[in-house]
Image: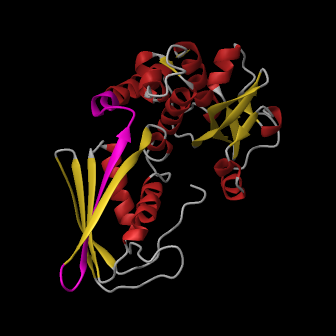
C-alpha cells in the first residue's frame, strides 16, 4: 500500500506464534538492541514475519492478538504508532484473493491495550489487539462456497480471455445484487459493505460490490484493487468505492455500483478522463500508487 513504512532492525526476533481458541499470541525475545533515530524508538526486526502472522489472525477472525516482547529501554509512548504500522503492513496486498483489500475493506479497525513491567534487567511488554470484523467466520465460510459456485457458473475455460472474465463478473454482480437502500444511513450496520452481503444476501452498498468484485476477479486471475474516494452526483459529494482492474498491461476503472444505480454501462473499463465525477482519496491519488497502478489514457 502507498505510505506503508517498512520497519528497520531493532533487536527483536520472532520466537513463536500460536492461535488458540480464537486468540493469537506472538512472543518475542531480544537478541541485540538497536535504537533507530526518527519517529520510533523501537521497531521489529522480523516485521514481515510478524505482519504475516497478524494477517493470518485477521483472516481467521481471531478475537484477540497478543504480542509479548522485551526491551532494555522504556518505549510506552511508541506502542500505538508501532501497532499502527504493524496492522497496515498486515493488510498489504498478497498473493491470495483473501489477502490485501479483501481483509482491509471487511475490517473496521481495532481496539488496543498495552502494558509493561520491569523485570530487573529488562521491560516485558504485553500488547493486546482486538480487531473489529464486519463478518463472522461462518459467514466467510459461506462466502467461500458462494465464490466457488459463482465461478463455476461463469464457466471460465482455458481459452477465456481476461476481458471475458471481467465482463462476466461485472455483469453477474450487476444482475444479481441490488443496492441496499434500507441500511444506507445506518452507521452501525456494516454487513452490506462485505462480499457476503453481495454474494449471499444479494444486496450491498458500494463497498460490498467492490469487495465481491475484488474477490471474484482475483480468484479468476485478474489483478485489481479497491479505490476509495467520493463521487459527485446531483450537486452532492458522497463517500464511494470502486475497482481498478488490470487488462492488457494497464488499469481501468470499473464501478459496478454506479452502473447499477444509473442503469447504464458507462462505468465499465473507463479511463480517469471518463470519470471526472470520481475523486480518489489522497492515498489512492498519490504518485506512488498511480505509478504502481497506471490507468490507461483511453477507455477500453
Find residue 195 and report its horizontal and vertical position in percent.
Answer: 45, 28
Asked where in the image residue 279 lies, by quadrant, the reply is: top right
Residue at the image position 42 percent from the left and 40 percent from the top: 107
User: Which one is nearer the viewer's eye here, 249 or 181?
Assistant: 181
Asked where in the image residue 119 lies, by quadrant, the reply is: bottom left
Residue 123 covered by magenta stretch: yes
In the image, 23: left or right of 213?
left
Examine the rendered structure and indicate whether residue 188 appears above or below residue 263.
below
Find residue 54 and report its horizontal and vertical position in percent.
Answer: 34, 55
Examine the rendered structure and indicate whether residue 32 appears above or below residue 128.
below
Tell me if I can see residue 3 in this picture.
Answer: yes
Residue at the image position 28 percent from the left and 53 percent from the top: 65
Examine the rendered structure and indicate whether residue 230 appears above or below residue 26.
above
Residue at the image position 41 percent from the left and 75 percent from the top: 42
Find residue 254 and report its horizontal and vertical position in percent.
Answer: 67, 31
Q: Quadrant of the C terminus?
A: top right
User: Which one is nearer the viewer's eye here, 88 or 129?
Assistant: 129
In the image, 289: left or right of 193?
right
In the image, 277: left or right of 210?
right
Q: Which residues are magenta?
A: 119-141
User: Which one is nearer the viewer's eye here, 298 or 24?
Assistant: 24
Tell me if I can see residue 152 in this picture.
Answer: no
Asked where in the image residue 70 lies, by quadrant, the reply is: bottom left
Amino acid at each position: 500500500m502507498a505510505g506503508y513504512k517498512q520497519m528497520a532492525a531493532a533487536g527483536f526476533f520472532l520466537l513463536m506464534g500460536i492461535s488458540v481458541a480464537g486468540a493469537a499470541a506472538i512472543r518475542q525475545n531480544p537478541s541485540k538492541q538497536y535504537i533507530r533515530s526518527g519517529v520510533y524508538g523501537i521497531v521489529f526486526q522480523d516485521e514481515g514475519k510478524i505482519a504475516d502472522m497478524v494477517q493470518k489472525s485477521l483472516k481467521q477472525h481471531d478475537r484477540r492478538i497478543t504480542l509479548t516482547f522485551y526491551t532494555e529501554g522504556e518505549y510506552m509512548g511508541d506502542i500505538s504508532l508501532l501497532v499502527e504500522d504493524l496492522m497496515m503492513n498486515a493488510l498489504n496486498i498478497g498473493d491470495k484473493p483473501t489477502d490485501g483489500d479483501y481483509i482491509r475493506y471487511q475490517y473496521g479497525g481495532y481496539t488496543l491495550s498495552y502494558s509493561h513491567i520491569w523485570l530487573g534487567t529488562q521491560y516485558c511488554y504485553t500488547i493486546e489487539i482486538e480487531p473489529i470484523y464486519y463478518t463472522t467466520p461462518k459467514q466467510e465460510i459461506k462466502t467461500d462456497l458462494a465464490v466457488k459456485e459463482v465461478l463455476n457458473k461463469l464457466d471460465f475455460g482455458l481459452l477465456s480471455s481476461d476481458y471475458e472474465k471481467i465482463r462476466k463478473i461485472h455483469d453477474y454482480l450487476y444482475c444479481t445484487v441490488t443496492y441496499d437502500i434500507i441500511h444506507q444511513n445506518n452507521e452501525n450496520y456494516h454487513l452490506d459493505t462485505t462480499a457476503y452481503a453481495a454474494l449471499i444476501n444479494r444486496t450491498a452498498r458500494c463497498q460490498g460490490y467492490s469487495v465481491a468484485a475484488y474477490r471474484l476477479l482475483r480468484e479468476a486471475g485478474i489483478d485489481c484493487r479497491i479505490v476509495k474516494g467520493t463521487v459527485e452526483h446531483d450537486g452532492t459529494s458522497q463517500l464511494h468505492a470502486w475497482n481498478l482492474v488490470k487488462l492488457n498491461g494497464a488499469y481501468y476503472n470499473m464501478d459496478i455500483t454506479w452502473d447499477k444505480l444509473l442503469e447504464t454501462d458507462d462505468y465499465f473499463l473507463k479511463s480517469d478522463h471518463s470519470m471526472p465525477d470520481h475523486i480518489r482519496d489522497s492515498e489512492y491519488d498519490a504518485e506512488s500508487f498511480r505509478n504502481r497502478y497506471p490507468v490507461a489514457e483511453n477507455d477500453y
